[in-house]
Image (cartoon, helix red, strand yellow):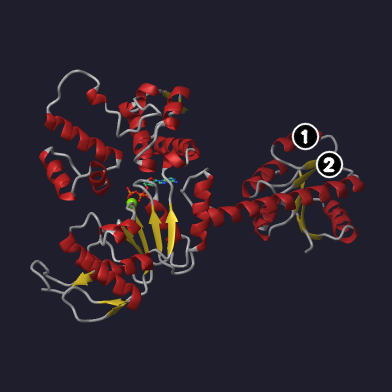
Amino acid sequence: MSKLIFIVDDEQSISKLLSFWVKDKWGYDVEIFPNSESMLKKLSSRPDLVLLDIMLPGLDGIETLKRIKQADEHLPVIMLSAQGRIDVAVDSIKYGAYDYFSKPIDQQKLELALKNAIRNYDLLKEVQNLKEHVKKEYSFDNIISADGKMQDVFKLVSKVLDNDISVLIYGESGTGKELIARAIHYNGNRKDKPFVVVNCASIPRELLESELFGHEKGSFTGAHQRKLGKFEYAKDGTIFLDEVGELEMLLQAKLLRVIQQKEFERVGGTELIKTNVRIISATNRDLKHAVEQKQFREDLYYRLNSFPIFIPPIRQRRADILVLTEYFLEEFNKKLQKNVKGFTKKALKLIYEYDWPGNVREMENTIERCLIISEKDHLDVDDLPQHIRAADTSASVDQQNVMFTDYNIIPFEKIKEKSIRHALKVTGGNIVEAARKLQLGRATIYRLMEKYGIEG
Ligand SMILES: Nc1ncnc2c1ncn2[C@@H]1O[C@H](COP(=O)(O)OP(=O)(O)OP(=O)(O)O)[C@@H](O)[C@H]1O
Ligand SMILES: [Mg+2]
């Protein structure tokens, strides 16, 4: 395809001569403008180079150059100056001009400069394209990662964007399961349709069925009117079943039917409702194990698990610790209107070596907290929470416990309370996960939280 050159000069004799060279002799397409304003309006037609006179009526050459660079910093601009105004021409290089020529212009030199500039620009555009391509394919807005393991995850994600295959996302709490589910939805062909989240663990069993499928008026005590379920809200979109492993057997059966027959009834209703919702689910449990334990239906497991994606915990992708630290620092600086420059080396070392059992969520919370409480320019070791400071790389958080290091005997109740608070903190408030780590039933943890006045 022929290249397009813009020529901006108020002197007709010059633009005619330039056009003769550029178009008739060198074979480029040309468009001539008597002033900058008219040229700037046409920038959207994507010229490959601009020949720009410095002395122009209206906007002068330097000002025009700045505007061009704002629109496309790589678009090459060659400045043309009248004799004796070479100082301004030199100045233009500072603002990103590719080259400058003073009149009378040396034809051969200009031809060479033009050629080189255009080739350069082509290359830059190619690199840019490549970058965007990679970005589109393997990375997603606001998912930050530098680790190869996550790049593999992104590759998998990019394969399921535009189809309806059921994706099951595995990962410890706080690893970014929901973020990945959203990325799948919002980068896929359902992006203009709803993305609806249902947390199968946080909704009491009795209500979950109606939450998912809706209910008819009077279908049970308290059902004063018809209610639509999440499957209906998610029409043509995606439903994200978080903690799907917590689904009880009865609902597992109903979900299986929705997947197989693409229809369901509201609770207490008879009308068959068609659905073509895409299902993405997530779990931090070993679902296969749950199947073996007969806690999860095998047939449903295979349906949901058509395309499993495993998100590794932070401690297995340490490269991400530092990029995420930087990212959250920037985010919370903005959000909290602070200007913390970074962490000291010692603090960074601790951050890097810590295991982050609560994964990215724990990092996010920790950095926000650090920024809130500290007034320093560079956050230091003493700005980090005690458990990170105390972390010795050889001991995991579960083992080390500051409480037992002194000889005071601590009332048992206090230890229980501390243990629960700690578990909730580490899991970012994820009660199911905390219960699992504490090896307690969910009911027990709820009861204890109430007892100690811990908010969910
Ligand atoms: N790679 C990442 N880049 C930026 N932010 C991230 C990344 N991974 C996770 N986060 C952030 O960390 C937090 C936890 O992520 P998310 O809720 O997706 O995790 P999860 O696996 O669903 O956790 P849980 O099991 O606790 O529900 C969110 O605020 C999310 O935005
Ligand atoms: Mg989640």
Spatial distance from mark 1 to mark 2, Cα to Cα?
10 Å
Relative horizontal placement of residue 330, taking residue 439 as reference (left or right):
right
The numbered mark, 1 or 2, whose residue comes first in the sequence reads 1
Q: Image quadrant for the N terminus?
A: bottom right
Q: Which residue is mark 2?
A: 101
Q: Does residue 229 sit above or below 341 in this rendering?
A: below
Q: Nearer the viewer, residue 117 or 55?
A: 117
Q: Is residue 369 visible?
A: yes
Residue at far top of view: 407
Secondary element at tag 1: helix
Say if disc 1 is inside 8 Å of ligand 1.
no
Q: Is residue 72 left or right of residue 278?
A: right
Q: Position of residue 315 (x, y in %)?
A: 43, 39
**Towards the viewer: 217 or 3:** 217
Residue for point 15% across, 25% down: 410
Label 2, secondary structure: give it. strand
Q: Quadrant of residue 19?
A: bottom right
Disc marking residue 90: 1
Three-letter residue code for mark 1 = Val
Badge 2 amino acid? Phe
Q: Is residue 198 visible?
A: no
